Image: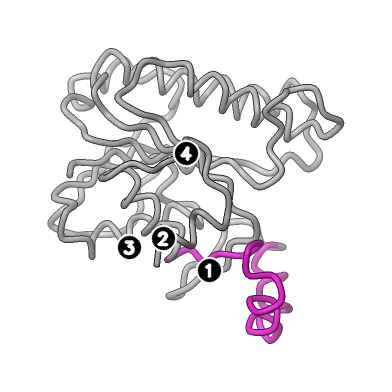
């Protein structure tokens, strides 16, 4: 399986990159980002672009992929709906439309979030924008598209978020992970489980196009 990975330097993307290197069915991983990952592996090729919404110069390198794992995302805290829509909806759709030209037969796997609003009319701004993005992706004529909605994602194997207060929260809550995983198993996953599930669904599909945390953990196991 030949995969494209967007967001490889983020917490979830780092997890996907690690599992892709370990996955015997994944033969090539091409990352697309604004900066290099800093990693080296025989499977890895890196494409760096300062503007991910304008990938025309890279189109010859985006041909013949089996899957796109899209892990780019930002927090909505402190952002207006217009700004959040630009970096969430507009950027994602620009990438997706480019890939429809270069690799229309791929499977598009998008990391959204628990609580996403498919009606696009709810009170939570981020949930509306994520819902609009999901709906637009599901309408595109790729081979398949899957929306992943993880709840809390616990980093493993030394992976860290680029957001400092995420890391502080993970450190503070770490002693509670065993308890939380027992009392709320359907609201938590790990970077390892999420990445394994994304690769498995990219390879073999799933019975529903929207996967909640319960589905993610089921596929990963």
Q: What SS does tag 2 mark?
A: helix
Mark 4, residue position = 208
Q: Nearer the viewer, residue 159 or 26?
A: 26
Dot 4 or dot 1, earlier in sequence: 1
Q: Nearer the viewer, residue 21 or 203?
A: 203
93 sits left or right of 186 in the view: left
Marking on residue 18: 3
Determine the residue positioned at 42% across, 66% down: 192
**Residue 182 on the magenta span:** yes
Label 2–label 1 contact, CB within 8 A? yes
The CA span between labels 4 and 1 is 26 Å
Residue 151 appears in which quarter of the rendering? bottom right
The percent position of residue 214, horizontal first and vertical second, equals: 56, 58
Determine the residue positioned at 46% across, 58% down: 194
The relative height of residue 198 versus residue 112 in the rendered view (above or below) is below
The percent position of residue 132, horizontal first and vertical second, equals: 64, 22
The CA span between labels 1 and 3 is 12 Å
Marking on residue 15: 2
Label 2–label 4 contact, CB within 8 A? no
């Amino acid at each position: 399986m030949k995969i494209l990975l967007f967001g490889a330097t983020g917490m979830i993307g780092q997890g996907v990159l690690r599992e892709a290197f370990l996955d015997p069915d994944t033969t090539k991983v091409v990352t697309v980002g604004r900066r290099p990952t800093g990693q080296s592996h025989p499977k890895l090729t890196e494409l760096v672009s300062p503007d991910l919404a304008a990938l025309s110069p890279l189109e010859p390198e985006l041909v013949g992929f089996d899957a796109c794992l899209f892990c780019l995302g930002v927090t909505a805290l402190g952002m207006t709906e217009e700004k959040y829509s630009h970096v969430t909806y507009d950027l994602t759709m620009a990438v997706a439309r480019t890939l429809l030209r270069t690799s229309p037969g791929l499977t598009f796997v998008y990391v959204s979030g628990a609580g996403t609003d498919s009606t696009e009319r709810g009170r939570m701004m981020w949930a509306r924008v994520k819902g609009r993005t999901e709906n637009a992706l599901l309408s595109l004529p790729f081979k398949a598209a899957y929306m992943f909605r993880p709840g809390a994602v616990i980093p493993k194997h030394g992976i860290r978020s680029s957001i400092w207060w995420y890391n502080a929260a993970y450190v503070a809550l770490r002693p509670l992970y065993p308890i939380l995983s027992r009392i709320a198993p359907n609201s938590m996953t790990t970077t390892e489980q999420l990445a394994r599930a994304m690769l498995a669904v990219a390879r073999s599909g799933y019975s529903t196009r929207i996967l909640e945390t319960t589905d993610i953990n089921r596929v990963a196991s």
